[in-house]
Amino acid sequence: MWLTWRDAMEHALYGDNGFYLRERPSGHFRTSVGASPVFAEAVLRELVAVDDVLGAPPAIDLVDIGAGEGVLAAGVLAAAPPGLRSRLRVTGVDLARRPARLPEEIRWTASVPDGIHGLVIANEWLDNVPVDVAEQTADGPRLVLVDPSNGAERLGDRPQDADLAWLARWWPMRAAGERAEIGRPRDEAWTSVIAGLVGGRAVAIDYAHPVDDRPPCGTLAGYRDGAVVAPVPDGSCDITAHVALDACAAAGERAGAATTVLTTQRQALRALGVTGARPPVEQARSDPRGYLRALARSSEEAELIAAEGLGGFGWLSQTRFPVARPG
Ligand SMILES: C[S@@+](CC[C@H](N)C(=O)[O-])C[C@H]1O[C@@H](n2cnc3c(N)ncnc32)[C@H](O)[C@@H]1O
């Protein structure tokens, strides 16, 4: 059976007994959320800034899209100061079931809600939104088809016109044999987020590449049990592809985003106070326990901002700030 990559990913990840409906993501790969609670603290700082700009409304949303095991949503809720916590509505969005032991006040839903007033965070969501793969031939781009049982590939039809237009604008292929992941479904997914944002900020964080530096062979990869494996879409592993966040940014602007910042996690977290600075050595003598705690924290911060690692992720941040909240 030959499927397009988009259909194969959809089925392998989210179909009956699909990878994400069955598995705990943290058993297979490490994200910033799992790396350190420092990440949730930084997201809380971002939420506080948004709350401030919105004028501390009676209710403020934190919506975690692709919330996985709910660790980020629960971490922000637990760390929120009382004056914010009493107004905070936390929603986890995931196709996977509500995690066990998630605090009761966190709502759990399978689709992006409407009417969001606050902060949306989507950490490593878009790279799991299924995409088609195209390969350049002497006659132009053709879709790549895959056999889900073993990952074998062959060429299929020309992509549809909208996908050809996306490729021409966002991922032009030059030489025969080059491959591209057609990011249109990610643009649409992000559009639904910006459209659902009544006021506030939406942040997508992911492996990303810019239009002038797309990888010529694409980035499709599999992960299982903490290791990179061949991307066979049989449901046994995660299937992921880096994100054209610049294309998502343009889609967000068309959907009504008023401001756009596209930067790296390193820059974004540094601006939120995550610097990786080590404690002063004198503290080792005056307060050895505090020193060890501070040292552990600084190495967690360093991991989150490491340029060659998590710090190299893209942060797409877009806002909609209405003057006043109705009601
Ligand atoms: C790589 S995991 C990230 C989990 C978590 N955000 C973290 O950083 O650890 C991606 C998550 O996105 C979810 N997901 C993918 N597509 C989705 C969709 N269309 N709607 C809701 N959740 C989705 C998957 O089920 C999975 O839990």
Image: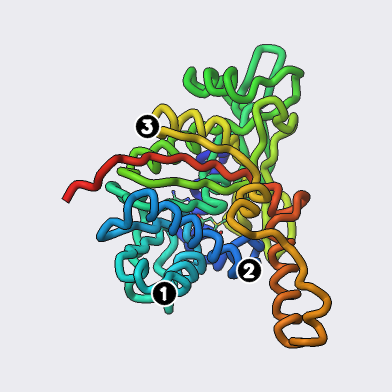
Residue at (74% x, 29% y) in the render: 216
Q: Earlier in the sequence, mark 2 or mark 3?
A: 2
Q: Amino acid at mark 3?
A: Gly
Q: Which residue is mark 1?
A: 102
Q: Visible in this render: residue 150?
A: no
Residue at (65% x, 44% y) in the render: 264
Q: Residue 324 placed where, x, y %?
A: 25, 44
Q: Is mark 2 within 8 Å of ligand 1?
A: no
* Residue 229 found in image quarter: bottom right
Closest to the observer, 146 or 248: 248
* Vertical placement of residue 163 versus 58, above or below: above
Q: Which residue is mark 2?
A: 36
Residue at (47% x, 72% y) in the render: 79
| Measured Cα–Cα span from mark 2 to mark 3 | 33 Å
10 Å crowding of disc 1: few (<14), some (14-19), many (20+):
some
Residue at (44% x, 62% y) in the render: 96
Q: Of helix, strand and loop, which one carries label 1? A: loop
User: Which label sits on residue 256?
Assistant: 3
Q: Earlier in the sequence, mark 1 or mark 2?
A: 2
Lateral position of residue 279 relative to residue 121, left or right: right
10 Å crowding of disc 2: few (<14), some (14-19), many (20+):
some
Q: Amino acid at mark 2?
A: Ser
- Label 1 or label 3, whichever lies nearer to me, is 3
Q: Earlier in the sequence, mark 1 or mark 3?
A: 1
| Measured Cα–Cα span from mark 1 to mark 3 | 33 Å
Q: Residue 34 placed where, x, y %?
A: 61, 67
Q: Quadrant location of the N terminus?
A: top right
